[in-house]
Amino acid sequence: MKKNRDIYDYIIVGAGIAGLYASLQIPEDKRALIIAKDKPWESNSFYAQGGISVARDNNDVELHIQDTLVAGAYSGDREAISVMVSHGVEVVNRLIDMGLQFDRDRDGELLYTKEGAHSTARILHLGGDATGRYMHSFFLNRNRHEILDDTSVVDILVDGESAHGVSIYKDGEMRNLYCRNLILASGGIGDIYKLNTNARSISGEIHGIAIEKGLPLQDMEMLQFHPTVVVMKDNETSLLSEAIRGEGATIVDEDGERFLFQYDERGELASRDIVSRAILNHKKRAYLSISHFEKEWFQKRFPTISKFLEGRGFKLTEDLIPISPAFHYSVGGIETDNNGLVKGYKNLYAIGEVASTGVHGANRLASNSLLEAIVFGDLAIKHSLSNEEPFEVREYPLIERELYKDGDDEVKKELQNLMWIYASIERRGETLQKALQRVREMMVMDIGRSLKLQLLTASEILSSAIKNRESKGVHFRVDV
Ligand code: SIN
């Protein structure tokens, strides 16, 4: 048995909002470790702008469930959605009781905004457009558990129905760490796409490990592209929150026409898959127009976005802002039950973007991701605390692996281009197949483990996209 210092009650892989909120629910007498690949704030949820959706009252619960189902092209799991929406009300109220200061009007009433495919304004926000940053800092400030940053998880130690720990790479050394409960909260796959909105550490490596270990994955072809992303010359991207459209911004083409109504009667507030496809198919440059907002109002409501745009020379609110869709969110992932438990395992959980709870169906409703992250993080810890089975931690041999090799950067660039061109908003069987073939060739090159895991994830996405011949939600096959 390993020395006591390396055995934890919980190891949480990922320090985004899902991982941090889950860690806050772990009693103080339990030993927990949070592992961050980069700095703890380099997570997708830290950069979340729009907000967190929540049913406004009992009457809104059913409507929120319906909106989630409709946005997901009726492919979502109704029971899981119902758990998220109903338990979400309780968890968000708990956050307010803890002192999280959602934006309020002058009378102290909570301010709700609207985003695409929501039939009512039910999105709470913080710091205008800095919801993720504020929530993340709020949780991080309250965290009592150990955080290991700049640490790569290179393997997970699983056997039969049990998880025993992780292999990590930190400061040039490999180590095994052991635990009684392993929680994967590592986020999505952004880094395998050339244009993406994700934090720099979000790479899909944990999905690759899950594939190696035979963990159940589902809906990996379901990838959401955000329609309003400003792309600068050097491919620097920045999200322009859907909440801007929720507040009334429009999308126009180079002739000044609001063309989205040709594609969907909801125009700018159609779901993201529809808006992204419309921009792609319209074949004219698309722009976000914020000209009917007062400059001061816009700066106050969207301070982060204003700062970014002004810093890049845009004149608020006069200039049209050129937009492009970019990869945003991985809808599928590691399959879990309604307690965040990975199917087939007794003490292995997946929460947040890395998980597939089934709530998003074929497309995620805007601002449901933070809600999903905290609800299933909460339920995962509750479930683990009620698990009374005696658990024996098993020791594993340490396997030395080279994480990065010379030449990886070039191969990765090719992967990112390949995925962007062939596995994005519209897909064809023939080119998906060619991309898969190339990814398989790359996998046998002399590359580091990190890239190998990303290639495994990419191959799973491509295979799932080839297998699924039905166009639904974000998966759009133009050849069938
Ligand atoms: C946004 O603010 O547009 C992104 C929010 C989300 O992805 O739900």
Image: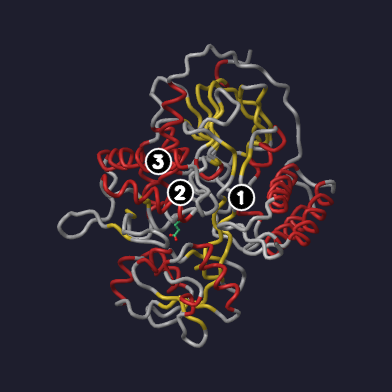
For mark 1, what is the residue? 189
Q: CA distance from mark 1 to mark 3?
A: 26 Å
Residue 82: mark: 3
Q: Nearer the viewer, residue 418 or 85?
A: 85
Q: CA distance from mark 2 to mark 1?
A: 15 Å
Residues at marks 2 and 1 touching, judged by CB atoms closer than 8 Å = no
Residue 180: mark: none
Q: Earlier in the sequence, mark 3 or mark 2?
A: 3
> Is residue 290 shown above or below 53?
below
Task: Name which residue type carries label 1.
Answer: Ile
Task: Name which residue type carries label 2.
Answer: Ser
For mark 2, what is the residue? 369
User: Residue 307, how many percent across, how many down?
Assistant: 41, 68
* Mark 3: C-beta under 8 Å from nearest atom of ligand 1: no
Which image quadrant is residue 246 in? bottom left
Figure quarter occupied by ligand 1: bottom left
Q: Dot 1: within a 10 Å radius of its alpha carbon, few (fewer than 14), some, or many (20 or more) residues?
A: many
Q: Nearer the viewer, residue 111 or 38?
A: 111
Q: Earlier in the sequence, mark 2 or mark 1?
A: 1
Of circles 1 and 3, the one toward us is 3
Quarter holding the C terminus is bottom right
User: How many tags in the picture?
Assistant: 3
Task: Name which residue type carries label 3.
Answer: Ser
